[in-house]
């Protein structure tokens, strides 16, 4: 959804201050204006105040809050309160409580732990959301619906078992088909009816925990079940306020949900960003991880602008060591979000509570409401910066390089009995490729295996272990039409059902390489290869393969691998497919990917960025190009640019050499 100005705001919990509302609420409104805040997210954990007893609703205080926001020129992002429930609900309707993998029922407490199959919970949520939508759907302050909070799901209660069995019936049709798809003849595990299939007890050994296929099916079910629950929550919202967009706040690579699937059900994707900055050279890597997460979250929303729903204007309180971000960090992390496609900068939270587990979490205001604080000043700086780059809001990204990250691959690798069994490093490997592409000056779109490949010139798909239906064919067609494809070790090992192939694996024709053996090493064991006059170390994983049409661009140098291909190139129609058969450092990937892409005519945003500096671009509806240069170094850097750029975030032009302050982001516009 295109915004005309950036949203700048925070989670706001005025009901925590109900007894002091006459002084605190008006002060909050004044402070919001002083801080340049224009949006507040309300109602996220308000169930106990909205429905203090079963069927007894009290919206009077929220009416007051919504009206107050409107009067003060603030927008409201209104949440559905399903993220946390009042104690009466668990007492009266115990089915709302989850059961864990060992079949132990939860007792009341904490949050984010409801059973989504519970008919009581589903009914209560529908009733609540209907009331909220009817009452506030046309409220002038209402800007967006915020559904629940940081959804997760893994419930093993009898109702969820039933739902799992129903889901399996839908997917497999017959129990015979399920048995074959899961290779259940192994260990005599063939089921004779769907009612015999239980959720895996993983990681506990109590019941089924070893079958990769069974585990994968459970993860898929949980993800689908949650996506359905999200739709249940949305139904009344969309019915009574079809003009109001719906979001849910995501958690980057959280393993429990296929966010691409969930993202497709939202109007706008939003996510909660909590990099734990260290104030030393580690911040470069932390910045690169954050870039990856922003790009991934944008990808789950189909590359449209997203919202950074939460971030911290100080130190978080839930880490083992809660390090204070040094001055300027809040501005950096805010502009970083914008650089990667966010149309908002929002924080957790507006005013810290006096108690509860988040009493010491960073916030715009401390409980006493004072503004003579560094956090407050930094939030004001962010407001000013967002105002100065206002025209960027609503612009989109348009990167020629797509990187594949797919939850189904991640799940399959989580249970794969091979290589580094408990840590295959899928997420780390994809992120390392992302970091390499950025170091080589590219902006990156992250997609899943079902995404449209046609907007891209290159598709980079590391460790694409499980092939979803049709992906190999679409990737091959993409190469034939002139695209560049890059794959690695541990690619195309299993089909959609997590079964190995009995015919030639589908990627073989594309890569021109037959995979023979997979080798995993512990620390200290290495190999290497030569590329562009340098020796590059290999560690952890290596594959032995035979050329079936491809040529070797580089070979292993040592041990019994010596002379075997490690980097390969295969012409496919008008395009090319490269493979890298072993795990290497990000620096090596930068050289390899940067080299291959440039050779193929895929140009980076900026050539030759200094170490620790990355670039990102957004494009306005009129074609205006905005360039963000991020200096993640804790010292200044100098970047060479062609002359035609002007700085948006401060006065003056920028041509030739642009000086980037320590840990800062420059926002430029093509002049
Ligand atoms: C999450 C939650 C918030 C809050 C913050 C604290 O992102 O959504 O409710 O707990 O973490 O960092
Ligand atoms: Zn359940």
Image: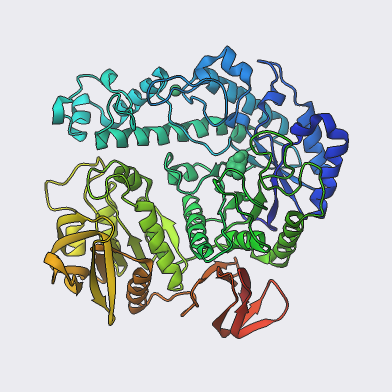
Task: Name the quarter showing ligand 2.
Answer: top left
Q: Which residue is nearer to you in this view: 224 or 529? A: 529
Q: Residue at x 58, y 12 (%)?
A: 92
Q: Is 457 situated left or right of 277 in this image? A: left
Q: Residue at x 58, y 37 (%)?
A: 149
At 33% across and 26% down in the image, what residue appears?
199
Tell whether 414 sits left or right of 232: left
Q: Is residue 203 above or below residue 332?
A: above
Asked if one can make out residue 288 in the rendered structure from this viewpoint, the answer is yes
What is the x, y in percent for residue 122? 53, 23
Quarter occupied by residue 26: top right
Residue 547 location in percent, x, y? 13, 66
Report the front residue among 132 and 441: 441
Q: Is residue 255 above or below residue 436?
A: above
Closer-to-camera residue (337/172): 337
Residue 404 at least partly seen: no
Give the position of the C terminus as an image quadrant. Answer: bottom right
In x, y percent, where is residue 30?
85, 48
């Amino acid at each position: 959804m295109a915004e005309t100005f950036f949203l700048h705001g925070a989670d706001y919990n005025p009901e925590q201050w109900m007894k002091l509302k006459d002084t605190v609420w008006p002060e909050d409104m004044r402070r919001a204006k002083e801080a340049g805040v224009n949006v507040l997210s309300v109602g996220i954990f308000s169930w106990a105040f909205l429905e203090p007893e079963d069927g007894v609703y009290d919206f009077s205080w929220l009416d007051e809050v919504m009206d107050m926001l409107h009067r003060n020129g603030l927008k409201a992002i209104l949440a559905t309160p399903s993220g946390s429930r009042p104690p009466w609900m668990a007492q009266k309707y115990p089915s709302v409580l989850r059961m864990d993998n060992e079949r132990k029922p939860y007792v009341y407490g904490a949050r984010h732990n409801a059973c989504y199959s519970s008919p009581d919970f589903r009914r209560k949520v529908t009733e609540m959301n209907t009331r909220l939508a009817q009452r506030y759907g046309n409220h002038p302050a209402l800007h967006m619906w915020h559904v629940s909070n940081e959804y997760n799901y893994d419930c093993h209660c009898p109702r969820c078992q039933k739902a799992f069995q129903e889901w399996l019936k839908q997917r497999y049709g017959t129990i015979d088909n399920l048995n074959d798809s899961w290779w259940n003849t192994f260990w005599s595990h063939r089921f004779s009816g769907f009612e015999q299939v239980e959720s895996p007890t993983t990681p506990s050994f109590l019941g089924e925990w070893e079958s990769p296929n069974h585990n994968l099916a459970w993860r898929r079910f949980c993800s689908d079940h949650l996506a359905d629950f999200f739709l249940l929550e949305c139904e009344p919202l969309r019915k009574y306020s079809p003009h109001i967009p719906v979001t849910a706040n995501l958690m980057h690579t959280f393993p429990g949900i296929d966010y691409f699937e969930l993202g497709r059900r939202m109007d706008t994707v939003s996510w909660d960003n909590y990099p734990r900055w260290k104030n030393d050279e580690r911040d470069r890597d932390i910045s690169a991880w954050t870039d990856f997460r922003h790009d991934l979250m944008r990808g789950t929303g189909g590359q449209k602008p997203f919202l950074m729903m939460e971030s911290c204007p100080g130190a978080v309180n839930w880490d083992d060591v809660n390090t204070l971000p040094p001055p300027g960090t809040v501005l950096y992390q805010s502009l970083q979000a914008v650089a990667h496609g966010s149309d908002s900068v929002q924080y957790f939270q507006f005013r810290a509570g006096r108690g509860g587990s988040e009493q010491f979490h960073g916030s715009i205001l401390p409980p006493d409401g004072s503004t003579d604080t560094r956090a407050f000043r930094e939030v004001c700086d962010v407001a000013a910066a967002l105002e100065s780059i206002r025209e960027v809001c609503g612009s989109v990204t348009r990167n020629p390089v797509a990187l594949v990250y797919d939850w189904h691959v991640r799940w399959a690798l989580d249970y794969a009995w091979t290589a580094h069994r408990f840590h295959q490093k899928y997420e780390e490997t994809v992120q390392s490729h992302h970091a390499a592409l950025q170091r080589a000056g590219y902006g990156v779109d992250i997609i899943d295996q079902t995404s449209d490949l046609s907007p891209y010139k290159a598709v980079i798909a590391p460790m694409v272990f499980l092939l979803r239906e049709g992906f190999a064919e679409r990737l091959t067609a993409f190469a034939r039409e002139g695209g560049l494809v890059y794959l690695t070790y541990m690619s195309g090992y299993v089909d959609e059902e997590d079964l190995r192939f009995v015919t030639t694996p589908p990627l073989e024709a594309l890569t021109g390489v037959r995979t023979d053996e997979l080798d995993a090493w512990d620390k200290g064991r290495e190999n290497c290869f030569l590329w562009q006059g340098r020796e590059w170390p290999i560690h952890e994983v290596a594959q032995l393969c035979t050329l079936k049409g491809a040529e070797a661009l580089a070979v292993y140098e040592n041990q019994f691998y010596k002379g075997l291909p490690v980097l390969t190139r295969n012409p496919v129609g008008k395009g090319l497919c490269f493979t890298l058969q072993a795990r290497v450092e990000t620096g090596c990937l930068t050289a390899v990917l940067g080299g291959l892409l440039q050779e193929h005519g895929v140009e980076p945003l900026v050539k030759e960025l200094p170490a620790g500096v990355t670039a990102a671009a957004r494009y306005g509806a009129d074609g205006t190009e905005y360039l963000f240069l991020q200096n993640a170094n804790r010292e200044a850097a100098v970047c060479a640019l062609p002359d035609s750029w002007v700085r948006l975030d401060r006065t003056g032009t920028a041509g030739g050499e642009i000086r980037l302050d320590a840990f800062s982001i420059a926002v430029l516009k093509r002049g």
